[in-house]
Each structure stands twice: as structure tokens, then as C-alpha cells.
Amino acid sequence: MTLPAEPAAKEITAQLITDVGFDPLYIGDLIPGARLLEDSSGLTRALAGRLDGPFFYRYGRPGEL
């Protein structure tokens, strides 16, 4: 799960993400990180709307998926 967060909140937020079973992927401070996340959500919604059935995606380095 992508994680845009201010430095003071990064550790706590990452732990909450881990606690619910996801791997946190830190993408930077809240600004501009949240904006990057908002911009990419348009592509995700467009893909999900054109596919027949559930749509899943994952971020990871080559060889980690």
C-alpha cells in the first residue's frame, strides 16, 4: 500500500498498514506524495472500468512479485 506521510507520522502509519496485512511503500512526504497518488488513481479507475471482473494491482521491484 502506498504511503505518503510527513516524517513524524511515517513510522506510525507504516505500522498501521503492516498491522492490516499490507506492505507499506513510502512514496515521500505528504506533499507531493499525496498528489502523485491522486494522479495515478485516475489510471487505476480507467483500467478497472474497462475490464470485465475484479481488478488487482501490486507495486514491487523486479523479482519481488
Image (cartoon, rainbow, N blue to C red):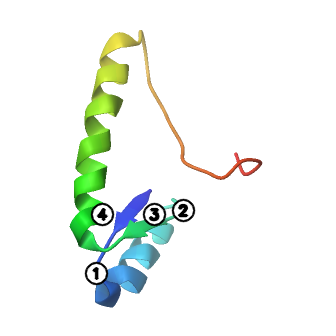
Label 4: state its secondary structure.
helix
- Tell me which amino acid carries mark 3: Val
**Residue 6 bears which disc, if any?**
1
Q: Where is residue 6 in the image (x, y as percent from the top left)?
A: 28, 81
Alpha carbon distance from label 3 to label 2: 9 Å
Nearer-the-camera pick, 36 or 9: 36
**Residue 33 bears which disc, if any?**
4
Nearer-the-camera pick, 55 or 19: 55
Alpha carbon distance from label 1 to label 2: 18 Å
Identify the mark nearer the N-term, 4 or 3: 3
Nearer-the-camera pick, 44 or 21: 44
Identify the mark nearer the N-term, 1 or 2: 1
**Residue 20 bears which disc, if any?**
3
- Tell me which amino acid carries mark 1: Glu
Q: Nearer the viewer, mark 1 or mark 2?
A: 1
The residue wearing badge 2 is 23
Label 3: state its secondary structure.
loop
Alpha carbon distance from label 4 to label 1: 10 Å
Identify the mark nearer the N-term, 4 or 1: 1
Q: Nearer the viewer, mark 4 or mark 3?
A: 4
